């Protein structure tokens, strides 16, 4: 009986460990799609997918005036990095979760790739329009994005400006 309980305990521990490990996996799928609408500095409507949020960064609420300036930078980056057919190169993660009421929620997180190797996500951190969060290191090099954020802080850009 002790041997059976030991084996059962081992199996349950292994399953629990496997669930934790798989919860941390990120499955980014490369897609080439049109960005139909820039809803804000951190959310977009993308062809065939719908609403997407920038992966690995957060964005503050801005006054209307500052928001308008930030949106110019977001739209410029997207336009400057479009393919000749009007699409953008994207990495998309589909996240399916179940809330406490048992309702399934599907969210999409996107990395909008730039032609120079810097994504929109990283660019917005470097400009102070977005900032790093607890998910940043799942998608990006932690030291690199922290340096981008520190430079934006020193330059007092957008979120980091004196109010």
Image: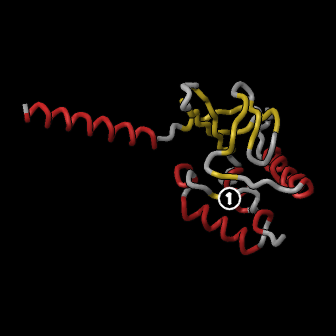
Image quarter of the N terminus = top left
Image height check: is 20 above or below 117?
above
Q: Position of residue 18 (x, y in %)?
A: 34, 38
Residue at the (69%, 71%) spot, across then down? 151
Which one is in front, 2 or 28?
A: 2
Specify whether 41 is left or right of 142: right
Identify the residue at image location x=70%, y=49%: 114
> Quadrant of the image for the C terminus?
bottom right
The residue nearer to you, when weighing 78 against 44, is 44
* Residue lying farthest to the right in this orientation: 65
| Quadrant of the image occupied by residue 66 | bottom right
Residue 23 spot, x, y in % from top left: 45, 39
Q: Position of residue 31 (x, y in %)?
A: 64, 33
In this picture, residue 78 sits left or right of residue 68: left
Report the side of 162 relative to 3 (left or right): right
**Of residues 161 and 144, which is closer to you in this image?**
161
Residue visible at 60% across and 65% down?
Answer: 146
Q: Is residue 107 visible?
A: yes
Q: Residue furthest bottom?
A: 154
Label total for image: 1
**Residue 97 shows up from this direction:** no
Instruction: Determine whether 162 is above or below 140 in the image.
Output: below
| Identity of the residue drawn at 76% across and 62% down | 127
Q: Residues within 10 Å of mark 1 (few under 14, many from 20)?
A: many
Name the residue that disc number 1 marks.
131
């Amino acid at each position: 009986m002790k041997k059976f309980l030991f084996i059962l305990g081992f199996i349950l521990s292994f399953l629990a460990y496997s669930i934790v490990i798989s919860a941390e996996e990120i499955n980014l799928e490369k897609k080439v799609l049109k960005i139909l609408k820039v809803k804000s500095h951190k959310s977009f409507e993308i062809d065939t997918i719908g609403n997407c949020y920038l992966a690995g960064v957060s964005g503050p609420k801005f006054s209307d005036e500052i928001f308008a300036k930030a949106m110019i930078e977001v739209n410029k980056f997207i336009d400057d990095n479009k393919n000749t057919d009007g699409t953008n190169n994207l990495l998309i993660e589909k996240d399916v979760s179940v809330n406490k009421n048992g309702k399934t929620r599907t969210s999409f997180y996107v990395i909008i790739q730039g032609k120079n190797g810097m994504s929109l996500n990283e660019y917005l951190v470097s400009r102070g329009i977005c900032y790093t969060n607890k998910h940043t290191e799942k998608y990006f090099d932690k030291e690199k994005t922290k340096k981008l954020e520190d430079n934006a802080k020193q330059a007092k850009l957008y979120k980091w400006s004196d109010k």
